[in-house]
Image: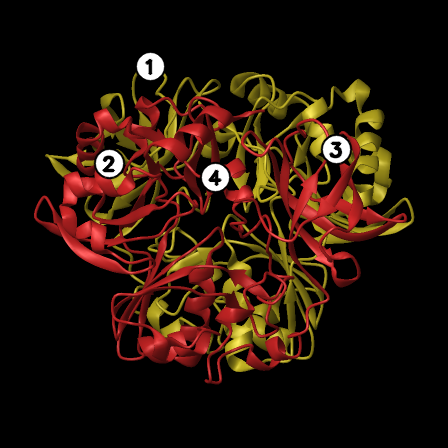
Chain colours: A yellow, B red
Amino acid sequence: MASIFPSTRVRRTPFSDGVNAAGMTVCSVYNRMILPSVFASEEEDYHHLKRHVQVWDVACERQVAVQGPDARALMDLLSPRDLDRMADDQCFYMPAIDRNGGMLNDPVLVKLAEDHYWISVADSDYILYVTGVADALGLDVRVWEPDVSPLGVQGPKSDDLMARVFGDAVRDIRFFRYKRLPFQGRDLVIARSGYSKQGGFEIYIEGSDIGMPLWDALFAAGQDLNVRAGCPSTKERVEGGLLSYGNDIRQENTPFEAGLGKFVNSPRDYIGKAGLMARAEPERQIRPVEIHGDPIPAIDRAWPLMAGGRKVGQVTSASWSPDFKTNVSIGMVDRSHWAPGTTLEIETQDGMRRATVRETFWT
Amino acid sequence: MASIFPSTRVRRTPFSDGVNAAGMTVCSVYNRMILPSVFASEEEDYHHLKRHVQVWDVACERQVAVQGPDARALMDLLSPRDLDRMADDQCFYMPAIDRNGGMLNDPVLVKLAEDHYWISVADSDYILYVTGVADALGLDVRVWEPDVSPLGVQGPKSDDLMARVFGDAVRDIRFFRYKRLPFQGRDLVIARSGYSKQGGFEIYIEGSDIGMPLWDALFAAGQDLNVRAGCPSTKERVEGGLLSYGNDIRQENTPFEAGLGKFVNSPRDYIGKAGLMARAEPERQIRPVEIHGDPIPAIDRAWPLMAGGRKVGQVTSASWSPDFKTNVSIGMVDRSHWAPGTTLEIETQDGMRRATVRETFWT
């Protein structure tokens, strides 16, 4: 594995000093920002996440701020999900699509006010699509990337740690809802959300200057909880079936293929509605796929799923699961072969393996 | 420096096998694709580039293909540069802007036909802006990322190497013009262009399958020319004043601030024309900045330029120049302090240095 070249273009985060001091050894680049990938080891990080509590630098989940008189009109043009059903304190997982129904991102939409939203994006410059639509139509709205960086607190002890810093009010935050709670005189949006199945929060740090103070406060408060710096765990998120845009879903895929059909319910005439409806019966779809045998090598390209010498899908995220003692993976599988129990072959960069389509992810 | 985490999301290129066999030690991520940064050492790679010939995996310069009846109309909406002046075999350096005149990318536009263009992009998903405009206006055009990956051949012996593989016709290709020349039965667009000042070509590989065959053919033909795998050199490109989008220019900057005013000449009513014209007298602009003293540390964040305790600009690309025996850098400097000879202070992550604004880059 090559090391990463320092540059201004690949951005530091408000938490980089903390991350480096904590001993990040492997990283990725996500939205042109450093995203930690490993601290101790993939396996040790994974076990710790499932037992204790971790603080995650997920600043790379950038916000696309949309504000102004036409903000809601613009969001209605963009969202396949019905925004009339969105409560004032709600976060909406929202498939973002082009006019053909192809997915451009899978952000979480945060409603700050009727005329002010944050689109918290996965790894693509969805801000440029939003800007392109607003510019082309001359909408009265401002679209920009604010100085807002999410900090994740994930793991079974998350509520206890957060309560020590923000008070017991955090315990009442419901799933995909948020509260504004004060830290050092600033009100921060704190949502019960995050990119693991272990529970926890995302704190939207407004103003990079309080990034390290909050980081330090969480570590000071959590010593006896065994708090550590962590990061999204491929092992854990693949077990739980959490999709990754750019890995498991791309512009060629519809929300239906991604298994996100339940979020397509807007009655409005959004961009891509006709294109999406024409593809409402997917010919392939996300499936959990077990890969048999010893631990697989690190996946660095799509692995074809084969049946009788013919490609019937591909796997794009995969890892050895220490808890389930098998290789877990996320596949996009053709309708002809997506039934649970179907046995396939998979072509890894180290050779062929046997694989089985499963009914559910691993929980 | 942390190492890079393998994933499907951060993409391999058609040349990755060659790059890895050649001993890439440091890399970056550019348009979600691996971009080599160092093979032997930054200094050795730099000297070699200036004396011999290198083959560069710059597949990360992705193409945004724009094709269809409305292709030219869409390009006219996007381009501040007058496309009537573009010859059929020409490549246009084109500032890409939003409605406020802020730069979204600084691509090279390649005209394949009146109704078919490639926008060869720097590090941002400009494809999403183009798609957003096309979708919002319902234009009759297809916008997509084709399987086209540029391979750079750079260095003073580039003409000799290329002539051995493609014939002497390559010698007649003019700067920022292209020819279609055959390789293994496929016609490839070959332009005299590239991200160095040492001369050379970019070969647009259409079809990943011929990536490694062409890579191998270039190395087989160039052994006595001392051909090596290389990559854009920060030292060399900063000496020559080649800008890097994401480092030296961003959405907050106009083409005028970037020193690209001469490319703003379209008579048409493109998106952002009014916004751009309102900012035609820049209050800051790109300048060569010499940083005095010993070799500087690797720059991983913008370094403020200070005068009398006040910030008057910033440096975003900088490196020790072995040939000029000083630290070369690219700054964005306020009008009040941009005159050649102005002495400033610069705040690196390792402390303050003296710096001087120069008249020209180093050549």
What residue is at 38 percent from the left and 39 percent from the top?
A: B11
Describe residue A259's horizontal placement relative to residue B333 as left or right.
left
Locate residue A226: give its quadrant: top right
Q: Determine contact: label 2, label 4, CB under 8 Å.
A: no
Task: Name the residue located 55 percent from the left edge and 43 percent from the top edge.
Answer: B238
| Label 4: element kind | strand
- In 3D space, how far apart are the residues under numbered discs 2 and 4 (Cα atoms)? 24 Å
User: Which residue is label 2 attached to?
Assistant: A304
Q: Chain of mark 4?
A: B
Q: Which residue is mark 3?
A: B349
Disc 4 versus disc 1: nearer the observer: 4
Q: Mark 4 and 3 residues: CB-CB less than 8 Å, in contact? A: no
Say which element carries label 1.
Answer: loop
Task: Please tell me in which quadrant of the rendered image residue B355 appears.
Answer: top right
In what element is the residue under mark 3? loop
Give the mark nearer the N terminus: 4 vs 3: 4
Disc 1: CA contacts within 10 A as few (<14), some (14-19) or many (>=20): few
Kindly identify which chain the residue marked by label 1 belongs to. A
- Residue B213 lies, in percent from the top left, at 17, 35
Q: Which mark is residue B29?
A: 4
- C-alpha distance separating marks 2 and 1: 19 Å
Q: Is residue A272 visible?
A: yes
Name the kind of residue labelled 2 in the image: Pro
The residue carrying mark 1 is: A294
Residue A326, image x, y percentages: 38, 20
Q: Residues within 10 Å of mark 2 (few under 14, many from 20)?
A: many
Q: Say what amino acid the circle numbered 1 marks.
A: Asp
